[in-house]
Amino acid sequence: MSKELIKQDINLLEYPLWFQDECEAEKSETGFTWRITKGENSDTKEFVLKTSFKPPVKTDLIFLLYLLMQSQNQSWKDEIKLSRYQILKQCGLSRNTQWYDRLEESLERWKKVEIQFNGAFYKGKEYETLHFGVVDSWGIEKETKKLRIRFSPEYLSMVQNTAYYRFLNFNQVKALRSPLATRLYQLLVKTFKNRDTWEIDSVLLAEKIPMKQKFPAHIVLKIKPAMNRIYKYTDLKVTVEERKKARGEIVLIFTKEAGQPKERPQEKKTQAFVMPDNDEFKKLVAMLPRERQRQKTLLETVLAAFTAKGFDYVAWNIRYANEKARGNYPAYLLKSLRGNFAEVMREEMEIRQTTDSKRTEEAQARQIKLTEDQAREARESAMVQEYLKSIPTEELAIIELEAHAKLPSFLRKSIEEVRKENHISFRCFIREIALKRLKKQVAEKPAPQQPELAEVVG
């Protein structure tokens, strides 16, 4: 089995363990409860995600999948040790203080999460009740600075021993980037194992994901771009079509593309396409969707049009087909090349360019403001540095204590440790307090008095 594949119980794909709206999650620092109920009366099935901290979001899912993959590759060890640098690198994130802090916060989020399946955990013939956490504990080793993560035994055992599972490809999940595409990908991986099509009402799908959009037309507008990302960045080649019903209802029909093995004998008999040694033609090929760049008949069509009409004509029509084609891409591109459909797109772009000067001016104004703000921040930073150097040690200690009190609870260590680590949050709070004091001193400083005019004695 590939080391990039992560085993997932189907219940963890059916129900969301993470929140798509990152802004809303940030507002829920004191706790959050997410409840999904299905069925009625005695047949009620309930899924609950509870946390006393911020709920996990897509970034936290990426971290969790990577950690779970490391446990899986080490024979399902319940405690793993990894460097923060390694985790951030493999998750495709920058290795800096901001992301070090975010990784630690992510572990705290998973540590606070409690998952409840109340009569909703599918185990073949029946549904069971199951409650578990995800991460039991985590810490940083003093000598090596490595993270030590201990998974919940119930969670790890459930994933390891489940008979109802699918595999997620870690690199493909990373590549999706979009929270909606990632959540939809989880549902499709669960659904497309022994079937080629899946029909579902658009509103019901939005509830399963879940989505904020409530109206079918709005739901479809969001689903289609997400499906394009799934098709482009994963091995799951599924297309979606819509079937309209009465009163604005829309049914979405997901179809898995037929496998390729049947076509291989025919490919052996077909002469391979010979790529011309022409830079402009190679640029046109690079503009095609990645999965179409080796399709012989399509390349022949593009080459014929390029020879007859030139680079610009073909390039515009490829752009048009990339944006508008739904379903049979080669046929759509052929029609576009024959009818020059891209001419409309080209005219629209020229119209837009007439308004670009105003937007450019606005952008320049924003840049000027940004530059001024940066200059102001630089002046303030210099003032703060001079101020902190000039004040007595006792007053500096008071400022440090006040900054230490502002640190989040999960980052708060002894002030000696914080000083030693030179924590970025600690430095920011010191700067903020010092700047506030400086501004107060300036505001309280009396203005120079004007000399009084002597009275003229007549």
Image: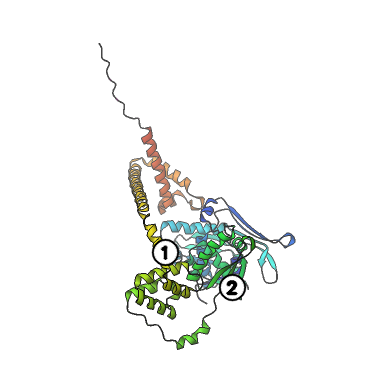
Q: Is residue 156 magenta?
A: no
Residue at 62% from the left image edge and 69% from the top image edge? 199
Residue at 44% from the left image edge and 58% from the top image edge? 99
Where does the C terminus fall, quadrant-wise?
top left
Which amino acid is tagged 2? Answer: Phe
Can you name the residue that lies furthest to the top here? Answer: 458
Q: Is 270 drawn above or below residue 289 in the view shown? A: below
- Residue 185 vs residue 362, the one in the foreground: 362
Quadrant housing residue 161: bottom right
Which amino acid is tagged 1? Answer: Met
Residue 261 in the image: x percent, y percent? 52, 83
Quadrant housing residue 430: top left
**Magenta highlight range:** 445-458
Q: Nearer the viewer, mark 1 or mark 2?
A: 1
Can residue 268 be seen at all in this image of the molecule? yes
Residue 72 in the image: x percent, y percent? 54, 71
Q: Secondary structure at mark 2?
A: loop
Q: Secondary structure at mark 1?
A: helix
Q: Is 169 drawn above or below residue 273 in the view shown? A: above
Residue that mark 2 sits on: 192
The tag on residue 345 is 1
Residue 373 in the image: x percent, y percent? 36, 47
- Residue 94 vs residue 185, the one in the foreground: 185
Can you name the residue that lies furthest to the right here? Answer: 42
Q: Is 168 drawn above or below residue 274 in the view shown? A: above
